[in-house]
Amino acid sequence: MKRLSLLLILVLSVVMIFSILMIGCKEEAVAEEEAVAEKEAVEEEAEEEVAPAEKFVIGFNPRALTSVFFITMTDAIQEEVKNYDGIEVEVLSTESQKDIEGQVKIVEDFIEKGVDMLAISINDPSSMIEPLKKANEKGIPIVILDSIYPLEGVEVLAYIGHDNTEGGKMMGEHVGELLNGEGKIAIIEGPPGVSVIQWRQQGFEESLVNYLGIEVVAQQPANADRGLAMDVMENMLEANPEIELVWAHIDNMAMGALTAIEGAGKLDDITICGYNGDEDVLAMIKEGKINATILQQPAEQAKMAVKIADMIRKGQADQVENINIIPIILVTSDNIDDY
Amino acid sequence: MLEKINERKFNFSSLRRSNILTPSIALIFLVVLLSFLSPHFLTVSNMLNVLRQVSIIAIVSVGMTYAILTGGIDLSVGSVVALSGVITTMLLKNYSVNMYLSILAGLTVGILCGVAVGSMISSKIKMPPFIAGLAMMAVVRGIALIITNGRPIYNLPEQFGFIGGGFLYRIPFPVIIMIVIYIIAFINLRFTKMGVSFYAIGGNEEAARVAGINIRRSTVFAYTISGLTAAVAGIVLASRVMVGQPIAGYFYELDAIAASVIGGARMGGGEANIWGTLIGALIMGILKNGLNLLNVSTYYQQVAIGIVIAGTISFNLLRKS
């Protein structure tokens, strides 16, 4: 038995390592190519003896690499730096968007390493003030992604983000028009206490002031979880069969709501709206199963950050705009073919 | 001494099977209360709805009860839920593997994870269950994220949706899977030598050893069952939402522990009742459903769930003392 379990541990670890290697090999190959290319580039530099622009390193810290939004942003920033000779990006991320202390450590590590620019999207603004002040002391320019939220006492070179209040307003306006200002609706909330979610809701409510006939009969959280959103939607349908429209603060919850509504055979009676512009929701809008979403552009945020890095490198930091709003777009069946 | 233990070995009635009276009363109380509070609660469609929502956690809880029964705990189940779902959906979608083979692969992954945790705990180094589970939880979650690159896998073949979303004679299919698993677990724990050995190890490992129970093998078995049930739950979940998510199953281990303990399982081992676990899972599920129907806000929901967990367990402990 002892031998057997030892053997099992061995086999298991081999299987796991093998599977990681198998799937990771593609990336490794790319990384190797890059390494080779880098080496060559270094050699070339040495040969030519011309001093090109010094390496400029962006320390990039997305909120967590478990959400499609930030994965897209990260992929985009890694792609985009390839278009600029000499700009590099280092990516460090916490495992969860709730890991506040982990993010503080990452930022401190970046400062310690002496990156040339910090590009971060913040989990918890108040706890980031102290570490970012240190970056200020060291003269490292700070670019904040995905939120435009003033940080007291911190000098931020640029904010890049979407206006979530505006997005909420757009959605509220759309819903108001869609229902002709009258009807019962449900809202599936995102994780409690997250500022972007609160802004979306706030904007939505501001718009609904113009449509007093619209009544929110159910409002329940589903923590950005698809399965949970499905449960919540099913429960809402039990309690409020008269719901005409449901708005989910985040697209993957809209997908969960869709599955629940389809399962209940009520797809013809209930309109579904989301927020984010995830691939699968866009596909569902094309199929006519989901009515609308607000398309965000994380890749555009990333490109903007790299552009700012380039400006800093060229000594044009004073020309960088402090607030950079990346446009959001209401996507419905009318304009879905453009996306 | 030896004789005495041997005698007791197959005396089933002497096993410390925990009483399910307290959790049953709590469940009935909750059902009655919610029936008065919401007209939508006690309807056939809502009851089926609740059972389906509960089924996934309830399935995970079976394995957790086994782990707790042997005196341990399995913290890796949430990550195994994610990995098995991801493996199954990836094979289905990216490699167009036959559905049954994909499911089999997902289940195998769960079994392997369970064997790994069990082996660490029962090996000569005797790793504490909490630590073994913690380590496995991180590794398995990491693998799920690595192989998917953090992205969910969607557009799954329609036939896969039956497992989590289908019906058999109007009963949701996940509920049937859940009931079958509970019946198997019940038979296993009550009427087989293997089941008795789990109670024995958790009750008194030394006595069990003297009685000739192979501690190592039984421990590995218990965690293998835990890995397997987590994998079943992972596949049901992936099928229900029709997406393989590497971030699925977060904190499922906590819900499963709560369900087992509300159901009368003793942390420390030697005492548990599989039907109690089912009642525990139902209490948690019905509470969430009821609070949803009543449109109670999130912040209050959290408080209510905490109070019910603490309350039920306090009563259980009070009754025993």
Image (cartoon, rainbow, N blue to C red):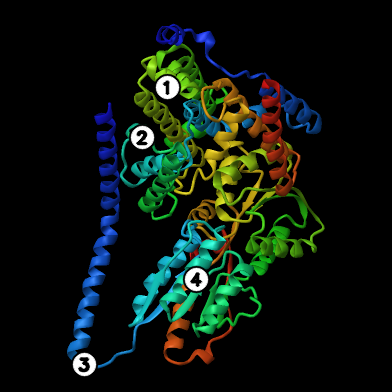
Q: Which percent across, then down, holds residue A273?
A: 62, 54
Residue for badge 2: B99
Q: CA distance from mark 1 to mark 3?
A: 75 Å
Chain of residue at mark 4? A
- State yes or no: discs 2 and 1 in contact (Cβ < 8 Å): no
Determine the residue positioned at 78% across, 31% down. B39
Q: Residues within 10 Å of mark 1 (few under 14, many from 20)?
A: some
**Residue A49 numbered tag:** 3
Q: Which residue is mark 1?
A: B206
Amino acid type, label 1 = Glu
Q: Residue at x 56, y 39 (%)?
A: B254
Secondary structure of the residue carrying numbered label 2: helix
Residue A97 on image: x %, y %: 54, 59
The residue singled out by tag 4 in the image is A107
**Dot 1 lies on which element?**
helix
Q: Quadrant of residue B35?
A: top right
Mark 3 or mark 2: which is in front?
Answer: 3
Q: Residue flagged by tag 4: what amino acid is it?
A: Val
Q: Amino acid at mark 3?
A: Glu
| Residue A188 seen in render | yes
Taking depth in this image into account, of B106 and A278 the one nearest to the observer is B106
Q: On residue A257, which mark appears?
A: none
Q: How many marks?
A: 4
Q: Secondary structure at mark 3?
A: loop
**Percent from the top left, x then y, of residue A154?**
61, 80
Residues at circles 1 and 3 in contact by the CB criterion of under 8 Å: no
